[in-house]
Image (spheres, helix red, strand yellow):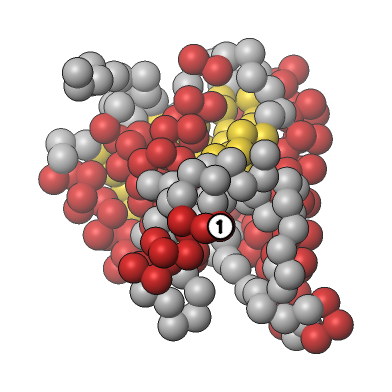
Amino acid sequence: MPLLPRDRFSGRTALVTGAGSGLGRAVALALAAEGANVVVAGRTRGPLAETVALIEAAGGTALAHPADVRRAEDMRALVGAAVDRFGSLDVAVNNAGVFRGGAPVADLPADDWHTLLDINVTGVLYALQAQVARMRTQDAGGAIVNISSNIGPHRTRPGTTAYGAAKAAVSALTRGAALDHIADGVRINAVSPGPTATSMSLRPHETEADRETRMKSESPLGRVSATAEVAAAVLYLASEDAASVVGTDLVIDGGAAA
């Protein structure tokens, strides 16, 4: 039996970073499908325009705004653009992130370490600061969901230590910020995906068919998560369905970290 359409975000404004592809695009599409006005952000305008076109083709409303999470001023301008266009900022999903892996800690290039921290950790901090600064001025407050990972906060794998350290920091930042700002009316939570049907879960020179075979032995579920499955978890945490959920880290990984 098909699910009935929902409009949990009707009339609300949602912002998604890293929305030019993959999980960020899936989250943006899901928010728009439930009535949100969606601001999609990323460093490259072309992919953002494609996301907007997909949302508009489905009858939704969206705005593309290029921004780099490594620049605090970009995050402030992004929030300002959302408010100028739609009048509020009700939901923010901090999805922008990168993966650098393969080397043990002793051989980790310094540039990889700094890139992981700059984008995956400091970028989330700058985004949170700009988002909370607006949301706590609104009578209705707001909800923020940070995208972490099962790697780092919940499990470890050889060659992913630096990435895991960055994502563990995201989870710790989420919990601390959640307690800091719930009194301001801002709910902050995290989603920690495992391997998902995006390019990030493909190993070097691996095809999607290769990944499918590998996951049959690596994942208790036997497959990667669909982007729509992870997006559904994000929307739950961002919605009033999760009104009493504060500072949680929801793992969506097919049982890998169980």
Among all residues in the image, which is located at the extreme front?
217
Can the viewer see residue 148 in this picture? no
Reply above or below: 101 against 67: below
Q: Quadrant of residue 47?
A: bottom left
Q: Quadrant of residue 49?
A: bottom left
Q: Which residue is mark 1?
A: 218
Instruction: Please tell me whether mark 1 sits on a helix, a strand or a loop.
Output: helix
Q: Position of residue 254 (x, y in %)?
A: 53, 42
Q: Residue at x 26, y 51 (%)?
A: 52
Can the viewer see residue 188 in this picture? yes
Reply above or below: 215 against 171: below
Q: Nearer the viewer, residue 133 or 254?
A: 254
Q: Nearer the viewer, residue 214 or 251?
A: 214
Q: Quadrant of residue 113?
A: bottom right
Q: How many marks?
A: 1
Among all residues in the image, which is located at the extreme right?
106
Q: Residue at x 36, y 19 (%)?
A: 8
Q: Position of residue 129 (x, y in %)?
A: 68, 43
Q: Position of residue 168 (x, y in %)?
A: 76, 51
Q: Residue at x 15, y 36 (%)?
A: 59
Q: Position of residue 127 (x, y in %)?
A: 62, 48
Name the amino acid type tagged 1. Glu
